[in-house]
Image: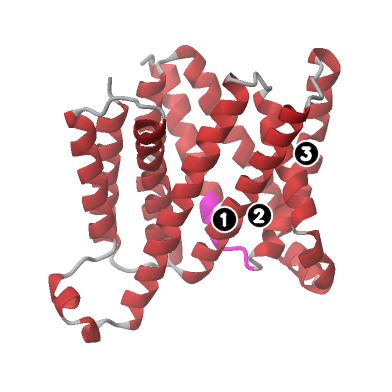
């Protein structure tokens, strides 16, 4: 991989971990997700209009239905991610979400697309699983005697649940978005954009019932919301650009370096516990993803 592309992907990793750190610090759950969808819809609207104006769009029922489905998937993903950040630590939820996403995608390709599975894939899956156990602070003593579990153990358990659930949703929208841009030949910018107004509409009833809370979230966190709304799509665009100049199997593992960055951000700015153990688990997950990505 050329050095400039490597630096580009690493920069994207920092951006991705950074906006997830900011998302962790914004309260509101679904209300924050609605606000973010509103801002992202406005920011990306001119680009999407330009895409349709210059390149057109086939208004077939399958194209419209596919965009609706991807919007629903992204909505559920954002809600589960934010719920995880409310209930648990960034250094638990983020590496598990990022690490298990490629695993579920690979399993889906094996089960439903009849892709071959190799020995290194099995080893990669085992490393990801081992990393998840390490991050969760797996203990045979607690397994044999559940009564010794503490409040922190319960918080970690919630983080494991929401992290893996988020990873599963990442794999779902990744596979489906891939179907949209390859099989249906939809423009990536339209697939990215339409998820936001759909999320806006789906969460509108919640937003209408809680307008004072939405105004309070905006007043207290408007700068973070603007940064997330700008950085999130920009980080993904950088990865797409890198994939045009380097093999996907080389870009993918470098991109997941954000797992390690997320744990370090949780340690430095959120004073989260057991960071060294979680960092080891994150490195195991990263190594597993590297094995899954190498061809």
At x 72%, y 28%, the residue is 63
- The range drawn in magenta is 20-27
Which colour scheme appears in the figure?
secondary structure
Q: Which residue is mark 1?
A: 22
Mark with earlier residue (3, 2): 3
Please, is residue 271 above or below residue 77 in the view? below
- Whether the magenta-drawn stretch holds residue 23 is answered as yes
At x 23%, y 38%, the residue is 124
Q: Which residue is mark 3?
A: 43
Closer to the camera: disc 3 or disc 1?
3
Expressed as whole percent of the image width and height from the top left, the position of residue 49 reads: 84, 26
The image shows a total of numbered marks equal to 3
Query: Dominant secondary structure of the magenta stretch?
Result: helix
Q: CA distance from mark 1 to mark 2?
A: 6 Å
Q: Determine contact: label 1, label 2, CB under 8 Å.
A: yes
State the SS at label 3: helix
**The disc label shown at residue 231, or none:** none
Quadrant in which the C terminus appears: top left
Q: CA distance from mark 3 to mark 1?
A: 19 Å
Q: CA distance from mark 3 to mark 2?
A: 15 Å
Q: Which residue is mark 2?
A: 224
Expressed as whole percent of the image width and height from the top left, the position of residue 228 reads: 64, 47
State the SS at label 2: helix
At x 32%, y 28%, the residue is 293
Q: Residues within 10 Å of mark 1 (few under 14, many from 20)?
A: some
Q: Could you tell whether 150 is left or right of 265 in the image?
A: left
Where residue 194 sits, quadrant-wise, is: top right
């Amino acid at each position: 991989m050329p050095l400039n592309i490597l630096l580009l992907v690493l920069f994207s990793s920092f951006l991705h971990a950074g906006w997830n750190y900011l998302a962790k610090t914004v309260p509101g759950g679904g209300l924050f997700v609605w606000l973010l969808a509103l801002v992202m819809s406005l920011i990306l609207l001119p680009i999407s209009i330009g895409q349709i104006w210059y390149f057109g769009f086939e208004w077939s029922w399958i194209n419209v239905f596919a965009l609706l489905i991807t919007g629903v998937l992204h909505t559920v993903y954002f809600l589960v991610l934010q719920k995880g950040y409310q209930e648990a630590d960034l250094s638990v939820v983020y590496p598990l979400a990022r690490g298990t996403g490629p695993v579920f995608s690979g399993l889906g390709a094996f089960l439903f697309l009849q892709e071959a599975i190799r020995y290194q894939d099995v080893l990669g899956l085992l490393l990801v699983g081992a990393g998840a156990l390490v991050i969760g602070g797996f203990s045979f003593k607690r397994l044999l005697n559940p009564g010794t579990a503490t409040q922190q153990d319960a918080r970690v358990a919630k983080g494991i649940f929401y992290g893996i659930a988020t990873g599963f949703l990442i794999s779902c929208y990744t596979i489906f978005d891939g179907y949209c841009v390859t099989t249906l030949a939809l423009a990536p910018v339209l697939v990215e954009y339409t998820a936001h107004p759909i999320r806006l509409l789906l969460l509108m009833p919640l937003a209408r019932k809680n307008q004072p809370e939405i105004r309070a979230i905006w007043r207290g966190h408007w700068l973070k919301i603007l940064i997330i709304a700008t950085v999130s799509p920009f980080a993904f665009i950088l990865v797409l650009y890198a994939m045009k100049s380097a093999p996907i199997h080389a870009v993918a593992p470098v991109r997941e370096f954000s797992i390690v960055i997320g744990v370090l951000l949780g340690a430095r700015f959120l004073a989260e516990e057991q960071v060294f153990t979680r960092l080891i688990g994150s490195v195991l997950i990263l190594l597993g993803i590297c094995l899954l990505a190498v061809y």
